[in-house]
Amino acid sequence: MDHFTLARQIDVVFRKIKEELSHMNSGTVFVHIRNNEIGKFGIKHLPFEGTEGALSAVENVGLTELQFQSFRQMAIESLKRKKSWTHGEILFDFAVRRNVISVSVSLESNYNMATYARTI
């Protein structure tokens, strides 16, 4: 993936998790970045709830094609907010309410002091 832009890598991530997202209406998509390359990625599902020893019934949930495309595009657009760091994590929290997808993006930059200690 080293010859792909980060935006292209985000696109690949979303295409890989599309099936899983089609069965979810909320959660967090995460990507771990090192040297501007995505290594680990995945989805954190919100907790399932249950009572009396049984999980609650699963309603008709999951992102529609239009919601998925909107989510993917928002994720790609969010990269414009990433400035000058090459290591870190991006979290895309999402939820569908009243058939509208909402997305919140958290950018986390990581630095390693051992890298800078050699230059001091």
Image (tube, rainbow, N blue to C red):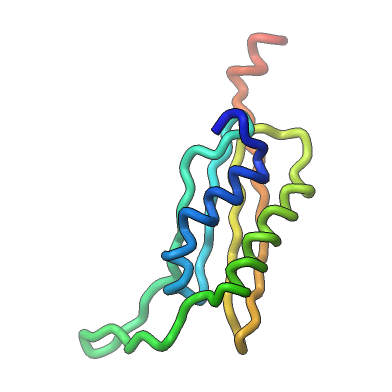
Residue 85: where, in percent of width, then height? 71, 34
Is 10 located above or below residue 60 in the figure? above
- In this view, the residue in front, 6 or 118, is 6
Q: Position of residue 23 (x, y in %)?
A: 42, 74
Quarter holding the N terminus is: top right
Residue in the image at 36% along x and 76% along y: 48
Q: How many marks?
A: 0
| Residue under the image location 67 percent in, 37 percent down | 5
Q: In the picture shown, does residue 3 fall above or below 59?
A: above
Residue 45 placement (x, y as % from top left): 43, 66
Most foreground residue, 29 or 15: 15
Of 7 and 82, which appears nearest the observer? 7
Q: Position of residue 117 (x, y in %)?
A: 64, 14
Query: In the figure, residue 115 lies in which quadrant?
Result: top right
Q: Is residue 110 left or right of residue 61?
A: right
Residue 19 picture quarter: bottom left
Please state which of residues 51 and 94 is positioned toward the viewer in this rendering. Answer: 94
> Residue shown at 73%/54% (left/top)?
78
